[in-house]
Structure formats: structure tokens, C-alpha cells
Amino acid sequence: MLGRTANGLYWMFRYIERAENIARLVDAGLRVSLTRAGSSDEDWHGVLESAGVRDAYKQVHAKLTAADAVDYLLRDTANSSSVLSCIESGRNNARMVRTALTRETWEATNEAWLDLKARLARNLKATELPELIDVIKHRCALIRGAFHGSMLRNDLYNFSRIGTFIERADNTSRILDVKYYVLLPSVSQVGGALDNFQWESILRSVSAHRSYGWVYDGDYQAGNIADFLILKVQMPRSLAYCYEKIVSNLGYLQREYAERHTAHDTADAIRATLTRGSITEIMDHGLHEFLEEFVSRNNQLSAEISQGYRFNQ
């Protein structure tokens, strides 16, 4: 396969996943801010920080307001990570590799772009946000469903899946960071009703509320929730699950091309950290520090995949 085709598929699915993930991050911010007594616009500093756009936001907005932050994350084309920008970038990459996609996958992607472009063409009211977030998640799920139901399980499929799970792992770590590091209430509230409600809100934001309840009987403890979203391989948005899939898809590529790259070793090492580690060790080391290091290693892996499979050729 040409490197630019692999690059197009990889980034198409990273952008589609990122669009949904940014919507989920906004949802997390909205849910957590509703639990804060005397909640202010300053709460959105943490959300912007976790989305990786805090400095960029400051360059275009002199003051932080909740409305501007939400607008910047959802529909500002000056923000390359906004939902609107991501959907457009995903669609552009899909168009570039159109002949590598099934008709169903292309149509689902194009329809998502048309629908969301129309919905995000105007300023949104706060009351419209929950419905919009649901539509974004629904549209992204339709693309994934069309892809899974119609694509051959070949190298095209593997590059697409790797892009999806690298982006998803990045997002889960950032959403966890919003709650634990940036938006954590005072020490006196840790473990209390407010703290538990915020954790519940985070679980709902990653579609993990009910599945968490099955595993832990609805006992909202910080350690259990961090364990569920980091180390529980059965949870499809956990870091461990994402790396099971990344290592698996890289393994298929290694066998298909009879080549092993630095990216394979890095992915194996990250997976081993998630497989052998315990949540007690992570919490003792510092959850924020662990997540910060994970994001850095995840980005390193992305760069190594691009270099190893010659994405720019």
C-alpha cells in the first residue's frame, strides 16, 4: 500500500474519533460544572487544557467564558481540533482515499459531514447542547458501523483501526485528567456525595456508567473508576483495551509486510505497562503524572508509526 493511502486512512479515523471525543469532553465539562457550587466560567480552563487547546484559545479570546469555550470546541474552524474542523478533516481524508473505502463507509462519512456542518453553522443555545452531543456521537457511530460491516480485514482495515484506538486512548486519558487533576473539588469533598456525582458524570461521558455498575455494583470510588478506565481490558474505551487492539493490528501489519518497526516495540512496552501495572501503583505514583506520561508515549507511538510506514511517501 502507498504510504499516503495508509496516512489518509489513519488520519481519517483519528479525526472521526476526535470529533466524537471532543464532544464527549464538552459533555464531561458540562456535567461536572453542573455539580460545582458557585460554578464559574473558570471551570472551562481545565476542559480546554485537557483538549490541548488552552493556549490557542487564549490567542483568539481575551476572556474565558463557558459559551466561548463550548463554541471554540464545537464549531470554531480556527481550532483544528473543533468538532466541525475534525469532521471536515476526516471527510477530506476519506475523499483522498475514496477508492480504498466501501460505498457504505464513504456515504456515512459524507452524510455526517453534511449534517453536522448544517447544525454547527449557527451559534448554539445551552439547551441544544445535549441533543447536539448525542447527534455527534450517533453520526460517528454510524461511520464505524458502516466500516466494520463492509470493509475487508486487510492492511486498510488495520491502519484505520490503529488511528481510531490511538485517538481513543488519548481522549480517555484526557477526560480522566479533567476530573482528577483539574476539576477535583476540595480535599474535604473527596469521596463525598459531590465527588461521587462528578465521577458518575465522567463515566456517563465515556458511555461506561452501566458497565461500571455491573463490575463494581455502582460503588463510585476514585480508585475503582480509574482502574476501570485505565486497566480494565473488557471496557472498550479503557487504555488497556485500546492498546490490546493497537498491538493486535500492528501485529497483523508486521505479518503482512514481514517488517517490524520501532513502533511495535513501543506499543508492546505501553501495553505491558497497562497489563502488569496495578491501580494502587498508579495512584501512589500520581494519577495526573501517569496520564501525562501516557499521553506523551501515545504521541511518540503515533510518530513512529508514521515514520515506519512512510506516511509521507
Image (tube, rainbow, N blue to C red):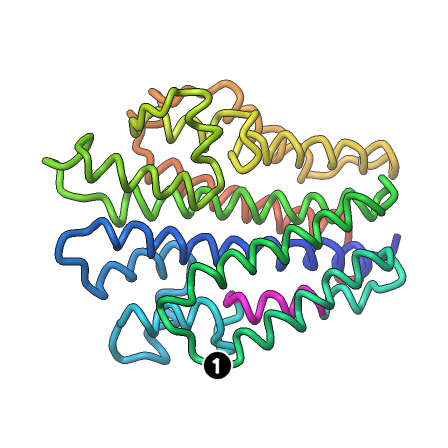
Q: Residue at x 73, y 36 (%)?
A: 250
Crowd band around label 1 with a 10 angstrom C-alpha radius: few (<14), some (14–19), many (20+): few
Would residue 74 be found to the left or right of residue 253 on screen? left
Residue 19 seen anywhere in this rendered image of the structure: no
Does the stretch in magenta take in 154?
no
What residue type is disc 1 on? Arg
Q: Residue furthest left?
A: 188
Would residue 289 be found to the left or right of residue 238 on screen? left
| Vertical relation: 239 (above or below) 104 | above
Residue 120 spot, x, y in % from top left: 52, 75
Would residue 291 be found to the left or right of residue 92 on screen? left
Residue 270 spot, x, y in % from top left: 55, 31
Element type at marker 1?
loop
Residue 103 spot, x, y in % from top left: 86, 59
Q: Residue at x 42, y 58 (%)?
A: 51
The answer to which quarter of the image holds residue 119 is bottom right
Comparing 86 with 215, the one in front is 215
Comparing 62 with 215, the one in front is 215
Q: Residue at x 47, y 68 (%)?
A: 74
Would residue 2 be found to the left or right of residue 238 on screen? right
| Vertical relation: 99 (above or below) 62 | above
- Give the main secondary structure of the magenta stretch: helix
Comparing 181 with 205, the one in front is 205
Which image quarter is the C terminus in?
A: bottom right
Q: Which residue is disc 1 drawn over?
A: 122
The total of numbered circles placed on residues is 1
Residue 220 seen anywhere in this rendered image of the structure: yes
Extent of the magenta region = 81-91
Residue 211 spot, x, y in % from top left: 48, 29
